Amino acid sequence: MDGSEATVGALVERALTAYASLAELGEEIDDEWSYIQDLTESWRERFEETRAARGSEELAAEIVTAIDLAIVEIGRIQDPHRAIDWLSTFPQVAITALGERP
Amino acid sequence: MRFQDAARDGRAVVYAGVQADPLVARAADLLADAGPAMRVMARAVMNGESTDRATWIGMFPTLFGSTSDAAMRDRAEALLDVALEVAERGEAVRSQFRGAIVEEVTARLLARRAPGAAIRRERRILFDGVRAEIHPYDVTVERDDASEAYDCKWGARGIGDDVLHQLDDARRHAQDEDTPLEVALVVFDARRSCDVRLGRSTAPVAGTRIVGLESLDDLGRR
């Protein structure tokens, strides 16, 4: 992994890509479609706050590993209801790993 | 205004068994004293995906990483083990345990400022001339001068108009009787997610305090 892949900006990008896939899975629950749009928009904004403030910051290997583990975790989810639960939980895990409060 | 035990129907009897499970008490003990990162970890683990301990240890460097001290790590490991025990239950049972744990944490935090005898569980609130709600409140603080009623939810998605109406109805009926009653919804999820859910609600929320994951400790303070 080169240095650019271990920056806050790169990690946020990877997290947002995984998050978008998770949202697609959750959208299978029609009744929650609007909630999912609002929820993901709100958490994307939170991620972007961190990227804007710390985008070029290099992260310790253990933080990169933590966020990549969280990305793998949500990638394993197949149930759309559980995906919706994780649409709130994943950002909290990732932002906590970045040393911030969600 | 008066309080009354909820009817002991079949569902209530089964749920009482969950509430009395020692795992609920152990989780609540640890969560009541946990910091924000530990509570996020517990939420993630109990959501139910991986039950691999090493995965979760790797996912929370603020708790288990090179900069965490031994005391923090010990507490976090204890909470992780309990959360994994919950996660390893089947989906339906896990859901019941999660609900019971949020209620028990709420009761324990309230006990930091209210006498234990005043804190009750699964109670209905009755008002003169008003048809009683069937659904009980999860936790109540019953005092002559300042009673409180709490409903508890595992996640923001659980916030529905029905529970918001029930809390607000109780508050308004108490107000009609000139009796103070504070109502609140405790949600074991980020306030940001709660606000999104509330933003789509048409139920009255102005008189209901929302206690999210970040502000759980406020339950124990006045």
Image (spheres, coloured by chain):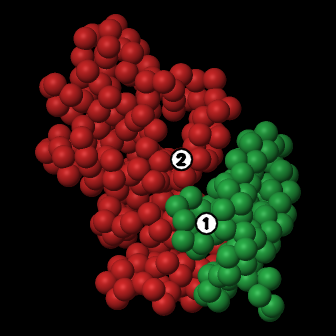
Chain colours: A green, B red
Picture coordinates of residue B72 (x, y %)? Answer: 36, 80
For residue A9, which quarter of the picture? bottom right
Q: Which mark is residue B191?
A: 2
Picture coordinates of residue B175 (x, y %)? Answer: 32, 13
Residue, x 24% and y 30% (percent of image)? B147
- Please name whichever residue, A6 or A43, is drawn nearer the observer in this view of the structure: A6
Q: Whole-Å distance between the Cαs marked 2 and 1?
A: 14 Å
- Please name whichever residue, A41 or B7, is drawn nearer the observer in this view of the structure: A41
Q: Which mark is residue B139?
A: none
Q: Pointer 1 indicates a residue of which chain?
A: A
Q: Which mark is residue A95?
A: 1
As drawn, is B15 to the left or to the right of A6? left
For residue A30, which quarter of the picture? top right
Compared with residue B83, is residue B101 higher up or lower down, i.e. above or below? above
- Please name whichever residue, A73 or B64, is drawn nearer the observer in this view of the structure: B64
Compared with residue B188, is residue B145 higher up or lower down, i.e. above or below? above
Q: Pointer 2 indicates a residue of which chain?
A: B
Compared with residue A34, is residue B34 higher up or lower down, i.e. above or below? below
Pair 2/1: label in front? 1
For residue A58, which quarter of the picture? bottom right
As helix, strand or loop, the secondary structure at mark 1 comes to: helix
In the image, what residue type sits under mark 2? Arg
Compared with residue B76, is residue B7 higher up or lower down, i.e. above or below? above
As drawn, is B125 to the left or to the right of B67? left
Crowding at dot 2, Cα within 10 Å, few <14 / some 14-19 / many 20+, comes out as some
Q: Which quadrant would the C terminus of chain A be assigned to in this image?
A: bottom right
In the image, what residue type sits under mark 1? Ile
Crowding at dot 1, Cα within 10 Å, few <14 / some 14-19 / many 20+, comes out as some
Residue, x 74% and y 42% (percent of image)? A38
